[in-house]
Structures are given as structure tokens and as C-alpha cells.
Image (tube, rainbow, N blue to C red):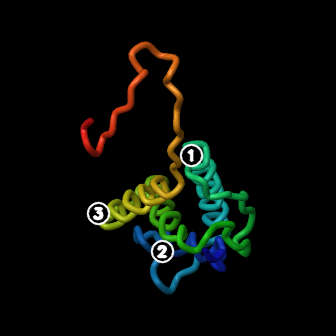
Amino acid sequence: MTASSKTTRSLVEESLREVGIIRENQTVTNTALQRAISKLNEMASDWEADGIELNWIPVDDGADILPIDETDERALRYNLALELAGSYGAPIPEVVTTVAFATKRRLEKSTTSLVECDVSHLPGTNYRYNIETDE
């Protein structure tokens, strides 16, 4: 895994472009950047609370390097685009929604761990069942 080298400003601008809030040659204003950074920190904190392990450290400035693995950048970009589109009342292209959900689902799967539970104390659990052989 490789740490991201992308700045927060770069991620925000890419997210805004995905939903047509700014054009390719435009940059984000400082006010819009701070609003987006706030939403990004909230979103990442929510994901961590839901069990998605980003190891997120809140960012404060557009020059901050994203505190994530570079393989997680796409999930943040498209999901932040959804968040920002809602706050600007911008239409959301179907591809943005599709990629946002798919990349978040990938993150959920990659950070989910199975926990083995001991149920031997429950009545009727003194046998083993193999799900693969149905025995």
C-alpha cells in the first residue's frame, strides 16, 4: 500500500468537477474549499464510526496531503462529490452515484473482519455443521 500524495484541494476540485460545480480550468474558492473540507472530515469520521478503517486524521487546509492510502482516493472523491452536489443543489450524474457506491462497498469489504463467536454455552450447539458439505 502506498500513501497518498494528493492534496486536499486537489481532491475537492476533482469532486466538484465530477458533478459540474466547477469547470476543468477553474479552481475552488477558499470559502467553498473550507466547506468541502468540513464535509470531507465529517464523511471520513462517519465512515470510521461505521467500521471503515481509513485511519483518518482530520485535514484543515487545502495544502494538507490526504491521510489515506492512494487506493482509497477514488472512493473519497466520488462520495465527496455526492455530498457536495447535495449542498449545491447540483444534479448528480448516474456514473458518479454508481462509482461512489461501488468504491465505498469495496472499502467496507476490505476493512471488514470476521469475528469467531463461541456459542457452545447455548442449548443445542454441541455439534459441528460444515456449510460447504451440508453435514
Q: Residues within 10 Å of mark 2 (few under 14, many from 20)?
A: some
* First in residue order: circle 1 vs circle 2: 2
- Is 61 situated above or below 130? below
Looking at the image, which residue is at 24% across and 38% down? Answer: 134
Q: Distance between the residues labelled 1 and 3?
A: 26 Å
When asked about the image quadrant of residue 67, the answer is: bottom right
- Please name which of the two marks, 1 or 2, marks the residue nearer to the observer: 1
Q: What residue type is labelled 3?
A: Glu
Q: How far apart are marks 1 and 2 (CA)?
A: 32 Å
Residue 24 place in picture, x, y as percent: 46, 83
Left or right of 46, for residue 22: left
When asked about the image quadrant of residue 130, the answer is: top left
Check disc 1 and report the residue beneath it: 51
- Please name which of the two marks, 3 or 2, marks the residue nearer to the observer: 3
Left or right of 94, for residue 9: right
Check disc 3 and report the residue beneath it: 94
Q: Residues within 10 Å of mark 1 (few under 14, many from 20)?
A: some
Quarter of the image where the C terminus is located: top left
> Foreground residue, 31 or 133?
133
Looking at the image, which residue is at 42% across and 71% down? Answer: 18
Q: What element carries label 2?
A: loop
